[in-house]
């Protein structure tokens, strides 16, 4: 089976996380797959050419003209495309940061720069793995399911669920703006467990309900305006849907 | 009955530990009380009213490995192939379950009567035929030191829920605050043995549990019709965070997962993970259909499981009146409004 790992415009944090967190499993990955393209690990076999593969993992948002070209080439050459990380699945910080800015005169060397978009704005994506960066454990689980012909799954719970399982005190109760009830779980409530509020870096939860969230924070004396601007940071393109549902 | 000072009572966990128990004590950290394994530097909280977790988390731990088995997975040039029942028909291998039952005895120090009754409820579920071997192994030889509550907080309702009394077998030592010290009433042989090691003065007389003071009084009416008809006030602000089920001491629903490993793909671990009826996949069936679609469906389902379903199946109520689902709900949803009648609030 062939696999490839691509990077579009991003910090390359997702692929770096995979390399550092998979440890000995990284070698196992090479035993299972023919990996022709994983630039961070070794020089691609066919140079910059996009190889024909069974599974393509793509990190990063579509920002430049090269990204646009690459993502359509990747889609055409891959049976299954997995968006790796929040940039690829939601657009992440780049999505909001590139809105309302005059990009017409900005160039990156000879490349044109556009408003950042997640992969799904340009091509069909078969599965999205959230996370900023992505979790190596979730990646492995999704991969092993794919190999067995089972559909990989996204967590159906919010960060709140895992936070309560860990026995943490609710940060909303102490008046901190925590996006836990809206954020997609699976991170093990990493931030709230050390007292830092959740910023929803994994994008919105499957059943995120903004209207309910706004009512809840109102009870804890937190301003709605503070929340809506915080949500924009990571949720990228998915914010639109969330805000639509959140209209009271 | 013996009378002890605070210092003596606080020695009890180390005494139990010396007796070979795994001791679980209430500790305070970051503004919440949480049960945790006893260590000599544990700051034991004797004044807590509610704890965010419960004995359930130790008797039915989340992510418990049930057994492991070898699958027929082989690494070939065509990739990894694991065969198991759900994918390709009957499993081609006999599953030789390799598992070790949990060992050791567990002791709960300073749990409240509602916690002791939550163990009673879990017993009726997990030990009814066929008994769960993992639960039974942990449960056998368990010792409980039950600390009486004098007064509940705004969310407590163990008196209306009738769960302040202790059945035989669910309290080895009863502890009551008295003056600047405590009265200890051993109720079983194991309890007597532990209490005798405290070297305290025996006193005449004995104590029996008494109902704590409640801030609210009401009657619970929780038949299926009552729950269907009852108002679900504030449910629109529910964010489905599932705090109600996670912090409930009697919620035992679980999901089973097979875990694969990249390094040794033929070694599969089967684990039991906590599940919540507030989650989407709780009621999901093949094809992706879900039965409990709305928040209200899930809210009423939770109450039905706690009250009428449990009474019918096990003869006791699944709600011990600890009030955790109310106290820890970020949206402040109060189930007493649905099932309580004649409230004085």
Image (spheres, coloured by chain):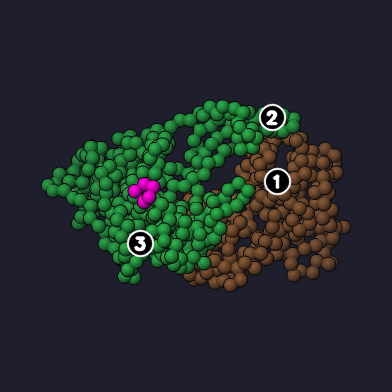
A172 with respect to B142 (left or right): right
B33 with respect to B84 (left or right): left
Residue B299: image location, x then y, percent:
47, 59
SS for dot 2: strand
Please tell me which residue lies in front, B156 or B120: B120
Query: Tag on residue B75?
Result: 2
Q: Which residue is mark 1?
A: A15
Q: Residue at x 32, y 48 (%)?
A: B116
Q: Is residue A222 above or below residue B4?
A: below
Alpha carbon distance from label 1 to label 2: 24 Å
Q: Which residue is mark 3?
A: B221
Q: Quadrant of residue B226?
A: bottom left
Alpha carbon distance from label 3 to label 1: 56 Å
Please tell me which residue lies in front, A152 or B52: A152
Q: Residue at x 55, y 29 (%)?
A: B95
Residue A50: image location, x then y, percent:
83, 44
Q: Nearer the viewer's eye, disc 3 or disc 2?
A: 3
All told, the count of numbered labels is: 3
Q: Is residue A221 above or below residue A112?
A: below
Which chain is assigned brown? Answer: A
- Please tell me whether residue B314 belongs to the stretch shown in magenta: yes
Secondary structure that dominates the magenta span: helix
């Amino acid at each position: 089976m062939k696999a490839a790992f691509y990077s579009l415009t991003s910090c390359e944090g997702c692929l770096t996380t995979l390399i550092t967190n998979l440890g000995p499993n990284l070698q196992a990955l090479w035993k299972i797959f023919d990996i022709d393209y994983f630039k961070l690990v070794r020089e691609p076999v066919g140079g910059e050419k996009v190889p024909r593969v069974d599974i393509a993992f793509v990190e990063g948002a579509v920002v430049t003209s090269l990204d646009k070209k690459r993502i359509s080439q990747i889609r055409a050459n891959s049976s299954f495309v997995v968006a790796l990380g929040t940039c690829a699945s939601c657009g992440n910080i780049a999505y909001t940061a590139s809105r309302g800015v005059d990009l017409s005169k900005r160039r990156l060397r000879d490349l044109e720069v556009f408003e950042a978009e997640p992969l799904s704005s340009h091509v069909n994506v078969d599965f999205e793995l959230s996370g900023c960066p992505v979790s190596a454990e979730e990646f492995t689980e999704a991969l092993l399911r794919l190999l067995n012909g089972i559909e990989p799954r996204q967590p159906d719970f919010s960060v709140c669920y895992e936070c309560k399982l860990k026995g943490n005190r609710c940060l909303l109760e102490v008046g901190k703006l925590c996006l836990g009830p809206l954020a997609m779980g699976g991170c093990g409530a990493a931030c709230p467990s050390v007292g830092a509020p959740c910023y929803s870096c994994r994008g919105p939860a499957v059943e995120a309900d903004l209207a309910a969230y706004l009512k809840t924070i109102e009870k804890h004396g937190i301003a709605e305006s503070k929340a809506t601007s915080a949500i924009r940071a990571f949720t990228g393109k998915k914010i639109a849907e969330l805000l639509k549902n959140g209209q009271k | 009955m013996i009378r002890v000072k605070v210092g003596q009572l606080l020695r009890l966990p180390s005494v139990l530990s010396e007796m070979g128990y795994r001791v679980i004590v209430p500790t305070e950290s970051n503004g919440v009380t949480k049960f945790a394994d006893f260590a000599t530097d544990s700051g034991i909280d004797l004044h807590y009213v509610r704890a965010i977790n419960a004995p359930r988390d130790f008797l039915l731990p989340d992510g418990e490995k049930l057994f492991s088995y070898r699958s027929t997975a082989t690494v070939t040039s065509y990739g990894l192939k694991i065969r198991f029942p759900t994918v390709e028909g009957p499993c081609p291998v006999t599953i030789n379950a390799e598992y070790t039952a949990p060992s050791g005895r567990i002791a709960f120090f300073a749990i409240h009567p509602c916690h002791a009754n939550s163990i009673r409820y879990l017993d009726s579920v997990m030990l009814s035929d066929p008994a769960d071997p993992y639960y039974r192994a942990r449960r056998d030889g368990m010792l409980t030191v039950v600390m009486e509550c004098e007064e509940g907080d705004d969310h407590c309702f163990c008196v209306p829920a009738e769960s302040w009394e202790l059945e035989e077998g669910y309290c080895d030592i009863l502890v009551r605050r008295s003056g600047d010290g405590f009265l200890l009433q051993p109720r079983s042989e194991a309890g007597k043995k532990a209490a005798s090691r405290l070297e305290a003065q025996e006193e005449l007389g004995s104590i029996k549990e008494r109902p704590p003071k409640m801030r609210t009084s009401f009657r619970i009416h929780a038949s299926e019709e009552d729950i269907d008809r009852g108002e679900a006030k504030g449910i629109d602000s529910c964010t489905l965070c599932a705090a109600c089920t996670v912090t409930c001491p009697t919620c035992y629903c679980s999901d089973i997962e097979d875990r694969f490993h990249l390094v040794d793909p033929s070694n599969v671990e089967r684990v039991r993970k906590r599940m919540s009826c507030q989650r989407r996949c709780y009621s999901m069936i093949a094809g992706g259909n879900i039965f409990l679609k709305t928040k209200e469906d899930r809210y009423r389902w939770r109450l039905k499981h706690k009250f009428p379903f449990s009474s019918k199946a096990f003869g006791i109520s699944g709600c011990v009146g600890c009030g955790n689902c109310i106290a820890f709900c970020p949206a402040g949803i109060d189930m007493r409004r649905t099932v309580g009648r004649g409230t004085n609030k």
